[in-house]
Image (cartoon, rainbow, N blue to C red):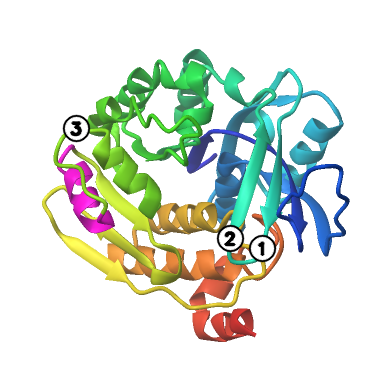
Amino acid sequence: MIDLLVLGDVNPDLVLSGDVVPRFEQQEQLLDGADLVLGGSGAIVAHGAARLGTRTRLVACVGDDLLGRHVRDLLVAGGVDPTGLVAASTTGLTVVLSTGGDRAMLTYPGSIPELTADLALDAIDRAADEGVRHVHVSSYFLLPKLTRGLGGVLEHARGRGLGTSLDTNFDPVGAWTGVAELLPFVDLLLPNATEVSALAAALGPAATGDPLQAARRLAGQGPTVVVKLGRDGAVEVTPDGKIIRDTGTPVVPVDTTGAGDTFVAAYLDGRLRGLPSTQCLRRACRAGALSTAAVGGTAGQPDAAQLDQPEHDEEAARR
Protein backbone atom coordinates (compact mmCIF):
# COMPACT_ATOMS: atom_id res chain seq x y z
CA MET A 1 0.00 0.00 0.00
CA ILE A 2 1.29 3.48 -0.86
CA ASP A 3 0.01 7.01 -0.36
CA LEU A 4 2.16 9.10 -2.69
CA LEU A 5 3.38 8.40 -6.22
CA VAL A 6 6.21 10.64 -7.47
CA LEU A 7 6.89 10.90 -11.21
CA GLY A 8 10.24 12.48 -11.88
CA ASP A 9 13.98 12.13 -11.91
CA VAL A 10 16.72 10.39 -9.98
CA ASN A 11 20.49 10.69 -10.24
CA PRO A 12 23.45 11.06 -7.93
CA ASP A 13 24.54 14.57 -7.00
CA LEU A 14 28.26 15.23 -6.68
CA VAL A 15 28.25 18.19 -4.28
CA LEU A 16 31.48 20.19 -4.34
CA SER A 17 31.98 22.89 -1.71
CA GLY A 18 34.53 25.60 -1.03
CA ASP A 19 36.26 27.54 -3.81
CA VAL A 20 33.89 26.24 -6.48
CA VAL A 21 33.81 29.07 -9.04
CA PRO A 22 35.69 27.52 -12.00
CA ARG A 23 38.80 29.18 -13.41
CA PHE A 24 39.79 27.83 -16.78
CA GLU A 25 43.20 27.84 -18.52
CA GLN A 26 44.05 24.59 -16.68
CA GLN A 27 44.08 26.14 -13.21
CA GLU A 28 43.72 23.57 -10.43
CA GLN A 29 41.60 24.47 -7.40
CA LEU A 30 41.49 22.76 -4.00
CA LEU A 31 38.02 22.26 -2.49
CA ASP A 32 36.70 21.92 1.05
CA GLY A 33 34.42 18.96 0.39
CA ALA A 34 33.10 16.45 -2.15
CA ASP A 35 30.03 14.32 -1.39
CA LEU A 36 28.22 11.83 -3.65
CA VAL A 37 24.59 11.89 -2.53
CA LEU A 38 21.07 11.13 -3.75
CA GLY A 39 19.90 13.73 -6.25
CA GLY A 40 17.08 14.56 -8.61
CA SER A 41 14.08 16.60 -7.55
CA GLY A 42 11.73 13.63 -7.73
CA ALA A 43 14.05 11.41 -5.71
CA ILE A 44 14.59 14.01 -2.99
CA VAL A 45 10.83 14.62 -2.68
CA ALA A 46 10.18 10.88 -2.46
CA HIS A 47 12.94 10.39 0.12
CA GLY A 48 11.71 13.33 2.22
CA ALA A 49 8.11 12.14 2.20
CA ALA A 50 9.12 8.59 3.13
CA ARG A 51 11.23 9.93 6.01
CA LEU A 52 8.13 11.70 7.33
CA GLY A 53 6.19 8.44 7.27
CA THR A 54 4.31 8.79 3.98
CA ARG A 55 4.35 5.53 2.02
CA THR A 56 6.00 6.65 -1.21
CA ARG A 57 6.91 5.15 -4.58
CA LEU A 58 9.19 6.85 -7.11
CA VAL A 59 8.72 6.36 -10.85
CA ALA A 60 11.87 7.36 -12.74
CA CYS A 61 14.36 6.01 -15.28
CA VAL A 62 17.79 4.97 -14.08
CA GLY A 63 20.67 3.09 -15.68
CA ASP A 64 21.73 -0.41 -14.73
CA ASP A 65 25.23 0.79 -13.88
CA LEU A 66 27.32 1.66 -10.83
CA LEU A 67 25.66 5.03 -10.26
CA GLY A 68 22.19 3.62 -10.91
CA ARG A 69 22.65 0.85 -8.37
CA HIS A 70 23.98 3.37 -5.88
CA VAL A 71 20.94 5.66 -6.07
CA ARG A 72 18.60 2.66 -5.93
CA ASP A 73 20.29 1.54 -2.71
CA LEU A 74 19.99 5.05 -1.26
CA LEU A 75 16.27 5.16 -2.05
CA VAL A 76 15.62 1.77 -0.47
CA ALA A 77 17.64 2.76 2.62
CA GLY A 78 15.45 5.88 2.87
CA GLY A 79 12.23 3.87 2.84
CA VAL A 80 11.15 4.66 -0.75
CA ASP A 81 9.40 1.90 -2.70
CA PRO A 82 11.73 1.31 -5.70
CA THR A 83 9.35 -0.82 -7.77
CA GLY A 84 8.57 2.14 -10.03
CA LEU A 85 12.18 2.54 -11.15
CA VAL A 86 12.62 1.73 -14.83
CA ALA A 87 15.90 0.31 -16.15
CA ALA A 88 17.14 2.54 -18.95
CA SER A 89 20.40 3.87 -20.39
CA THR A 90 23.28 5.52 -18.53
CA THR A 91 22.36 7.08 -15.20
CA GLY A 92 22.38 10.88 -15.17
CA LEU A 93 24.62 12.97 -12.93
CA THR A 94 24.48 16.46 -11.45
CA VAL A 95 27.56 18.33 -10.24
CA VAL A 96 26.53 20.86 -7.60
CA LEU A 97 28.87 23.78 -6.95
CA SER A 98 27.84 24.85 -3.47
CA THR A 99 28.83 28.00 -1.62
CA GLY A 100 26.49 27.29 1.31
CA GLY A 101 23.85 29.93 0.69
CA ASP A 102 23.75 29.44 -3.08
CA ARG A 103 24.65 26.84 -5.67
CA ALA A 104 25.10 26.20 -9.39
CA MET A 105 24.21 22.89 -11.02
CA LEU A 106 25.68 21.12 -14.04
CA THR A 107 23.53 18.18 -15.15
CA TYR A 108 24.19 15.34 -17.56
CA PRO A 109 20.63 14.02 -18.15
CA GLY A 110 21.53 10.42 -19.03
CA SER A 111 18.40 8.29 -18.65
CA ILE A 112 16.30 11.01 -16.96
CA PRO A 113 14.41 12.06 -20.16
CA GLU A 114 13.39 8.48 -20.95
CA LEU A 115 10.35 8.48 -18.64
CA THR A 116 7.29 8.40 -20.93
CA ALA A 117 3.60 9.17 -20.51
CA ASP A 118 2.75 5.49 -21.11
CA LEU A 119 5.07 4.41 -18.29
CA ALA A 120 3.46 7.02 -16.05
CA LEU A 121 -0.07 5.88 -16.88
CA ASP A 122 0.80 2.26 -16.10
CA ALA A 123 2.40 3.30 -12.81
CA ILE A 124 -0.68 5.32 -11.83
CA ASP A 125 -3.02 2.41 -12.52
CA ARG A 126 -0.88 0.01 -10.49
CA ALA A 127 -0.57 2.48 -7.63
CA ALA A 128 -4.29 3.29 -7.68
CA ASP A 129 -5.00 -0.41 -7.14
CA GLU A 130 -2.71 -0.21 -4.08
CA GLY A 131 -4.46 2.74 -2.47
CA VAL A 132 -2.37 5.68 -3.67
CA ARG A 133 -4.01 9.05 -2.98
CA HIS A 134 -1.79 11.60 -4.69
CA VAL A 135 0.46 11.91 -7.77
CA HIS A 136 3.29 14.44 -7.76
CA VAL A 137 5.35 15.41 -10.83
CA SER A 138 8.87 16.85 -10.50
CA SER A 139 11.35 18.30 -13.01
CA TYR A 140 8.86 18.98 -15.81
CA PHE A 141 11.45 20.53 -18.12
CA LEU A 142 13.82 17.53 -17.89
CA LEU A 143 11.17 14.98 -18.97
CA PRO A 144 10.15 15.75 -22.58
CA LYS A 145 8.72 12.27 -23.30
CA LEU A 146 6.50 12.55 -20.25
CA THR A 147 5.48 16.17 -20.68
CA ARG A 148 4.22 15.68 -24.23
CA GLY A 149 1.40 13.58 -22.75
CA LEU A 150 1.32 14.94 -19.21
CA GLY A 151 -2.08 16.58 -19.58
CA GLY A 152 -3.63 13.18 -20.26
CA VAL A 153 -1.64 11.61 -17.43
CA LEU A 154 -2.89 14.17 -14.91
CA GLU A 155 -6.44 13.96 -16.22
CA HIS A 156 -6.28 10.18 -15.88
CA ALA A 157 -5.04 10.48 -12.30
CA ARG A 158 -7.88 12.89 -11.51
CA GLY A 159 -10.33 10.44 -13.09
CA ARG A 160 -9.14 7.77 -10.67
CA GLY A 161 -9.84 10.09 -7.75
CA LEU A 162 -6.24 11.09 -7.06
CA GLY A 163 -4.85 14.47 -6.10
CA THR A 164 -2.22 16.00 -8.39
CA SER A 165 0.70 18.37 -7.94
CA LEU A 166 3.50 19.77 -10.07
CA ASP A 167 6.89 21.29 -9.31
CA THR A 168 8.33 22.28 -12.68
CA ASN A 169 11.76 23.23 -11.35
CA PHE A 170 13.92 25.49 -13.49
CA ASP A 171 13.73 25.48 -17.29
CA PRO A 172 17.32 25.17 -18.62
CA VAL A 173 16.17 26.47 -22.01
CA GLY A 174 14.39 29.48 -20.52
CA ALA A 175 11.20 29.07 -22.60
CA TRP A 176 8.82 28.04 -19.78
CA THR A 177 6.26 26.72 -22.27
CA GLY A 178 3.66 23.95 -21.99
CA VAL A 179 2.67 24.40 -18.36
CA ALA A 180 -0.37 26.62 -18.95
CA GLU A 181 -2.25 23.77 -20.62
CA LEU A 182 -1.72 21.56 -17.56
CA LEU A 183 -3.00 23.95 -14.89
CA PRO A 184 -6.67 22.86 -15.09
CA PHE A 185 -5.54 19.34 -14.12
CA VAL A 186 -3.19 20.39 -11.30
CA ASP A 187 -4.40 20.71 -7.70
CA LEU A 188 -1.11 22.11 -6.37
CA LEU A 189 1.59 24.06 -8.20
CA LEU A 190 4.79 24.41 -6.13
CA PRO A 191 7.31 26.78 -7.77
CA ASN A 192 9.96 28.98 -6.19
CA ALA A 193 10.01 32.76 -6.59
CA THR A 194 11.95 32.72 -9.87
CA GLU A 195 9.85 29.95 -11.36
CA VAL A 196 6.47 31.42 -10.42
CA SER A 197 7.28 34.71 -12.15
CA ALA A 198 8.56 32.95 -15.28
CA LEU A 199 5.53 30.65 -15.44
CA ALA A 200 3.15 33.60 -15.06
CA ALA A 201 4.99 35.54 -17.77
CA ALA A 202 4.56 32.57 -20.11
CA LEU A 203 0.77 33.01 -19.87
CA GLY A 204 1.05 36.16 -21.98
CA PRO A 205 0.72 39.92 -21.40
CA ALA A 206 0.38 41.43 -17.92
CA ALA A 207 3.40 39.48 -16.65
CA THR A 208 4.79 40.54 -13.30
CA GLY A 209 8.03 40.01 -11.45
CA ASP A 210 6.24 40.05 -8.09
CA PRO A 211 5.88 36.44 -6.82
CA LEU A 212 2.56 37.06 -5.08
CA GLN A 213 0.96 38.67 -8.11
CA ALA A 214 2.37 35.93 -10.32
CA ALA A 215 0.94 33.28 -7.97
CA ARG A 216 -2.47 34.96 -8.10
CA ARG A 217 -2.42 34.89 -11.88
CA LEU A 218 -1.50 31.20 -12.02
CA ALA A 219 -4.03 30.29 -9.33
CA GLY A 220 -6.70 31.88 -11.48
CA GLN A 221 -6.08 29.04 -13.96
CA GLY A 222 -7.12 26.36 -11.45
CA PRO A 223 -4.45 25.20 -8.99
CA THR A 224 -3.58 26.29 -5.50
CA VAL A 225 -0.14 27.86 -5.89
CA VAL A 226 2.43 27.41 -3.11
CA VAL A 227 5.51 29.58 -3.64
CA LYS A 228 8.82 28.74 -1.94
CA LEU A 229 10.51 31.99 -0.96
CA GLY A 230 13.70 30.65 0.61
CA ARG A 231 14.74 32.59 3.72
CA ASP A 232 11.47 34.59 3.44
CA GLY A 233 9.28 31.52 4.01
CA ALA A 234 6.41 30.69 1.68
CA VAL A 235 3.02 31.88 0.50
CA GLU A 236 -0.04 29.94 -0.60
CA VAL A 237 -2.64 31.39 -2.98
CA THR A 238 -5.88 29.52 -3.64
CA PRO A 239 -7.97 29.81 -6.83
CA ASP A 240 -10.52 31.94 -4.97
CA GLY A 241 -7.78 34.41 -3.94
CA LYS A 242 -7.19 33.39 -0.32
CA ILE A 243 -3.60 34.09 0.77
CA ILE A 244 -1.73 32.31 3.58
CA ARG A 245 1.85 33.21 4.51
CA ASP A 246 4.55 31.69 6.65
CA THR A 247 7.63 33.79 7.39
CA GLY A 248 9.90 30.77 7.60
CA THR A 249 12.81 30.08 9.92
CA PRO A 250 16.14 31.90 9.48
CA VAL A 251 19.10 29.52 9.54
CA VAL A 252 22.74 29.59 8.54
CA PRO A 253 22.83 26.99 5.76
CA VAL A 254 25.57 24.45 5.23
CA ASP A 255 24.15 23.52 1.81
CA THR A 256 20.82 24.51 0.26
CA THR A 257 20.73 21.61 -2.23
CA GLY A 258 17.26 20.02 -2.19
CA ALA A 259 15.77 22.41 0.36
CA GLY A 260 12.88 23.23 -1.97
CA ASP A 261 12.24 19.55 -2.64
CA THR A 262 12.22 18.82 1.10
CA PHE A 263 9.72 21.67 1.47
CA VAL A 264 7.52 20.00 -1.14
CA ALA A 265 7.80 16.61 0.58
CA ALA A 266 6.70 18.06 3.92
CA TYR A 267 3.88 20.07 2.36
CA LEU A 268 2.48 17.01 0.57
CA ASP A 269 2.89 14.93 3.72
CA GLY A 270 0.83 17.51 5.61
CA ARG A 271 -1.89 17.51 2.99
CA LEU A 272 -2.07 13.72 3.04
CA ARG A 273 -2.37 13.86 6.83
CA GLY A 274 -5.35 16.22 6.46
CA LEU A 275 -3.62 19.16 8.16
CA PRO A 276 -4.84 22.73 7.55
CA SER A 277 -2.92 24.85 5.06
CA THR A 278 -1.34 27.01 7.76
CA GLN A 279 0.19 23.94 9.38
CA CYS A 280 1.22 22.45 6.04
CA LEU A 281 3.10 25.66 5.21
CA ARG A 282 4.69 25.88 8.65
CA ARG A 283 5.92 22.28 8.59
CA ALA A 284 7.18 22.65 5.02
CA CYS A 285 9.18 25.80 5.83
CA ARG A 286 10.66 24.11 8.89
CA ALA A 287 11.56 21.00 6.92
CA GLY A 288 13.26 23.02 4.19
CA ALA A 289 15.24 25.03 6.73
CA LEU A 290 16.37 21.98 8.69
CA SER A 291 17.45 20.21 5.51
CA THR A 292 20.13 22.87 4.88
CA ALA A 293 22.08 21.77 7.98
CA ALA A 294 23.82 18.95 6.04
CA VAL A 295 25.43 18.50 2.64
CA GLY A 296 23.18 17.17 -0.12
CA GLY A 297 19.44 16.98 -0.55
CA THR A 298 18.57 14.18 1.89
CA ALA A 299 21.09 13.97 4.77
CA GLY A 300 19.41 16.78 6.72
CA GLN A 301 15.80 15.88 5.97
CA PRO A 302 13.76 15.79 9.20
CA ASP A 303 11.47 13.04 10.40
CA ALA A 304 7.97 13.70 11.73
CA ALA A 305 9.15 13.85 15.34
CA GLN A 306 11.55 16.67 14.48
CA LEU A 307 8.78 18.69 12.87
CA ASP A 308 6.68 18.20 16.00
CA GLN A 309 9.39 19.86 18.11
CA PRO A 310 10.57 22.57 15.71
CA GLU A 311 11.95 25.10 18.19
CA HIS A 312 14.66 22.74 19.42
CA ASP A 313 15.67 21.60 15.96
CA GLU A 314 15.58 25.05 14.38
CA GLU A 315 17.90 26.32 17.12
CA ALA A 316 20.23 23.42 16.37
CA ALA A 317 20.15 24.34 12.67
CA ARG A 318 21.05 27.94 13.51
CA ARG A 319 24.11 26.73 15.40
| Residue 191, x across and y down, in percent | 38, 48
Which of the 4 image quarters holds residue 57? top right
Rounded to the nearest angstrom, the CA distance separating label 1 from label 2 is 5 Å
Main SS type for the magenta part?
helix
**Which residue was labeled with disc 2?**
102
**Which residue was labeled with disc 1?**
99
Q: Residue at 34%, 18% (x, y): give it.
A: 152
Let me know if residue 213 is in the magenta part: yes
Rounded to the nearest angstrom, the CA distance separating label 3 from label 1 is 35 Å
Mark 1 and 2 residues: CB-CB less than 8 Å, in contact?
Answer: yes
Amino acid type of the residue that numbered disc 2 sits on in the rendered structure: Asp
Query: For the magenta stretch, what is the residue range?
Result: 210-221
- In the image shown, does 272 or 71 lie closer to the viewer? 71
Mark 3 and 2 residues: CB-CB less than 8 Å, in contact?
Answer: no
Point out the image quarter for the C terminus.
bottom right
Let me know if residue 214 is in the magenta part: yes
- In the image shown, does 14 or 146 lie closer to the viewer? 14
Amino acid type of the residue that numbered disc 3 sits on in the rendered structure: Gly
**Which residue was labeled with disc 3?**
204
Q: Residue at 68%, 58% (x, y): give it.
A: 98
Amino acid type of the residue that numbered disc 1 sits on in the rendered structure: Thr
Is residue 81 visible to the viewer in this orientation of the structure? no
Rounded to the nearest angstrom, the CA distance separating label 3 from label 2 is 30 Å
| Residue 292, x across and y down, in percent | 61, 66
Q: Residue at 15%, 59% (x, y): give it.
A: 242
Circle 3: is it few (<14), some (14-19), or many (20+) Cα within 10 Å? Answer: few
Q: Residue at 32%, 47% (x, y): give it.
A: 196
- In the image shown, does 174 or 10 lie closer to the viewer? 174
Indicate which disc, 3 or 2, sits on the residue closer to the N terminus.
Answer: 2
